[in-house]
Image (cartoon, helix red, strand yellow):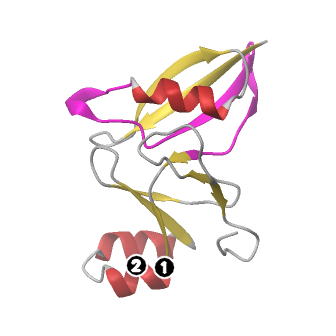
């Protein structure tokens, strides 16, 4: 079985994706690889997921690791970004309790789901803290 990391960058209608083979699900290695990825129009990755390929199907995949950003609850989005009507509507319709705003290249608003991890990139440093949303949807 082979291990891969799939990087996601802002795209026109959907995310741009780049896949790299890796030796293991190593977050630090993925962060190093992300530094060199540039998609169309200069877009840089906002996150990545690992997966293990057990041909013919992917037999295992990770949560989303976000490469920096700010997590907001629905209430915070309504308060701080009242003109983001489409974002607010999407959060309400899709029952997203939290979203993440990432500005690695272009501003991207994405659902931050249970189990996702926000990496504090410290200017793409390699000694970073991890933040997660727990079952009560609070920062831990």
Q: CA distance from mark 1 to mark 2?
A: 5 Å
Q: Residues within 10 Å of mark 2 (few under 14, many from 20)?
A: some
Pinpoint residue 103: horizontal percent, then vertical percent: 33, 52
- The residue sitting at 54% across, 70% down in the picture is 98
- The residue sitting at 30% across, 54% down in the picture is 107
Quadrant where the C terminus is found in the figure = bottom right
In this view, the residue in front, 126 or 134, is: 126
Q: Are marks 1 and 2 in contact (CB under 8 Å)?
A: yes
Q: Which mark is residue 18?
A: none
Quadrant where the N terminus is found in the figure = top right
Q: Which residue range is magenta in the image?
A: 37-65
Residue 122 located left or right of residue 118: left
- In the picture of the structure, the residue carrying the numbered disc 1 is 74
In this view, the residue in front, 104 or 1, is: 104
Pinpoint residue 88: horizontal percent, then vertical percent: 39, 76
- The residue sitting at 41% across, 37% down in the picture is 45
Image quadrant where residue 55 sits: top right
Q: Residues within 10 Å of mark 1 (few under 14, many from 20)?
A: some
- The residue sitting at 34% across, 45% down in the picture is 104
For residue 125: magenta? no
Answer above or below: position of 52 versus 98.
above
Residue 65 located left or right of residue 72: right
For residue 56: magenta? yes
- In the picture of the structure, the residue carrying the numbered disc 2 is 77
Q: Which element is circle 1 on? A: helix
Residue 61 located left or right of residue 21: right
- Number of numbered discs visible in the structure rendering: 2
Q: Which element is circle 2 on? A: helix
Pinpoint residue 21: horizontal percent, then vertical percent: 61, 14
Pinpoint residue 6: horizontal percent, then vertical percent: 55, 28
Residue 56 located left or right of residue 37: right
């Amino acid at each position: 079985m082979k291990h891969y990391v799939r990087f996601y960058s802002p795209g026109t209608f959907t995310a741009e994706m780049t896949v790299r083979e890796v030796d293991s699900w190593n977050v630090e290695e993925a962060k190093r690889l992300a530094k060199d990825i540039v998609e169309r129009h200069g877009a840089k990755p906002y996150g990545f997921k690992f997966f293990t390929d057990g041909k013919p199907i992917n037999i295992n995949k990770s949560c989303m690791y976000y490469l920096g950003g700010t997590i907001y609850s629905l209430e915070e989005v309504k308060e701080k970004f009242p003109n983001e009507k489409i974002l607010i509507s999407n959060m309400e319709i899709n029952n997203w309790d939290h979203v993440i705003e990432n500005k690695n290249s272009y501003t991207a608003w994405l659902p931050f789901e249970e189990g996702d991890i926000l990496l504090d990139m410290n200017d793409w440093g390699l000694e970073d803290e991890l933040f997660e949303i727990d079952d009560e949807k609070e920062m831990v």
